[in-house]
Amino acid sequence: MNQTTTIANSLTLRSGRVVKNRFLKSAMSEQLANSVNDPTPELGRLYETWSMGGAAVLVTGNVMVSRNALGEPANVVLDEQADLEAFRRWAAAAKSGGSDVWMQINHPGKQSPNFLSKTPVAPSAIKLAGLDASFNPPRALEPQEIEDIIEAFAVAARLAKHTGFDGVQVHCAHGYLVSQFLSPRHNQRDDEWGGSLANRMRFLHETLRRVREAVGDGFSLSVKINSADFKKGGLERDEALEILKSLDQFNLDVIEISGGTYESPVMMAAAPKQSTIEREAYFIEFARLLKHEISTPLVVTGGFRSVSAMNEALSAGDTAMIGIARPLNVYPDLPNRAIEDASYRAHMKHLSSGVSYIDRNAMLELYWHERQIKRLGEGKAPQPDAGVLSALWFMFKNLGAGMFGKRRA
């Protein structure tokens, strides 16, 4: 990486596409699908706002590949039953400001709440620890069902390209189905899909192979994957490194680094450690280790707030792009601001109700940001000074007691 690399520099991706700067809007929960899980006009307006804000790449919130397996009630689903014109309108809006738009495609596996899935599916029939009130125990997938889900990922990718998206990101992090297959804790199968690390990687590898076959060359392909699960018995750093090394064969445009699952949701931490705050990027240390082991460009998401830290990480080659998520809900034009002002810093306040149980179990930060997303989708300005109670009331009106159930990231 050139020592003069900054957030304003363009980047030529392996797919041959050139993106205009180094900002990648990372996936967040939008909850803006309609009653049949198609994109709404509000979703298009939201992404038009973000595109006009200057990010080079917009990664959507997760789009489910099966309408029989949802992570949230208002998830978008892309399959043969979907309204493809609605997806075309969404893609066009997201590209209106010169951004590339990548669809994050996903299957929740057993991370599908009990009000949506009576019996969710997973690699093995192992329940989520400590989450009995929100998630039912899963059943193990049959081999043919595994093949069918892989095909569903390929179909979603093909339709994403057909409707005008520039790429797809396969969600392999945060404890969803691909992550479950990779985890020795959650995948205890004794067939070709489990056991050894090579077998646990099979689902991911077959999914990427089939997706690439479906979309061909020149279409961006990315993954979001854990550096570790941060849960005893789950995926740890050494195995994560081996998995990431194996991905060089798929000619990915970028790999986005994350971590955690619903059992240990470090990716949604409201109050990160002081050492993390000081270095800004949550997973930068893992990225520094990884960059010497693989050739695929990396994206580090989570924690970046200042232009100086962003440019430092880019110039050091620790990341090829700057992943930004929640700050864009408050400052949707953050990329433009940062490129224009080398001293720019996004200020994000810590949210707390003063009651730890509510902060933890109502997932206060998630709901506060979801309220900002809804405002942007309605064409309204964000409310960075909005209080905690207004966010809780907003979610109670929408979810009632269900607001205390676990949600996606």
Image (spheres, helix red, strand yellow):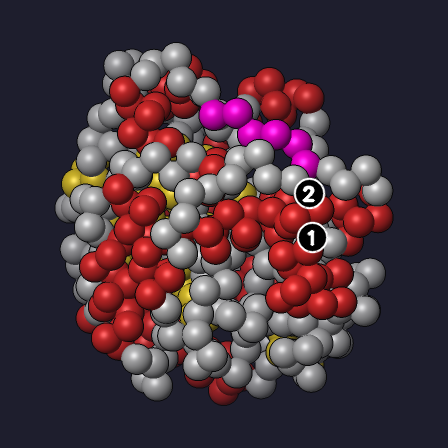
Q: Quadrant of residue 218?
A: bottom left
Q: Is residue 6 above or below residue 398?
A: above
Q: Which residue is disc 1 drawn over?
A: 392
Most common SS among magenta residues: loop
Amino acid type, label 1: Leu
For the point 21% across and 44% down, which residue is it?
97
Amino acid type, label 2: Val
- Could you say where residue 107 lies in the image, as x and y percent from the top left? 51, 70
Element under disc 2:
helix
Which residue is nearer to you in this view: 402 or 210?
402
Judged left or right of residue 339, residue 259 is right
Judged left or right of residue 10, residue 6 is right
Q: CA distance from mark 2 to mark 1?
A: 6 Å
Judged left or right of residue 179, residue 47 is left
Q: Which mark is residue 167?
A: none
Q: Is residue 273 above or below residue 259?
A: above
Can the viewer see residue 205? no
Residue stretch rendered in magenta on the structure: 346-351
- Could you say where residue 4 lies in the image, as x and y percent from the top left? 26, 14
Which residue is nearer to you in this view: 192 or 187?
187
Mark 2, residues whose alpha carbon is within 10 Å: few (<14), some, or many (≥20)? some
Residue 313 inside the magenta-drawn segment? no
For the point 44% across and 81% down, which residue is it?
36
Element under disc 1:
helix
- Could you say where residue 392 lies in the image, as x and y percent from the top left? 69, 52
For the point 45% across and 64% down, which residue is it?
32
Q: Quadrant of residue 70?
A: bottom right
Q: Which residue is disc 2 drawn over?
A: 388
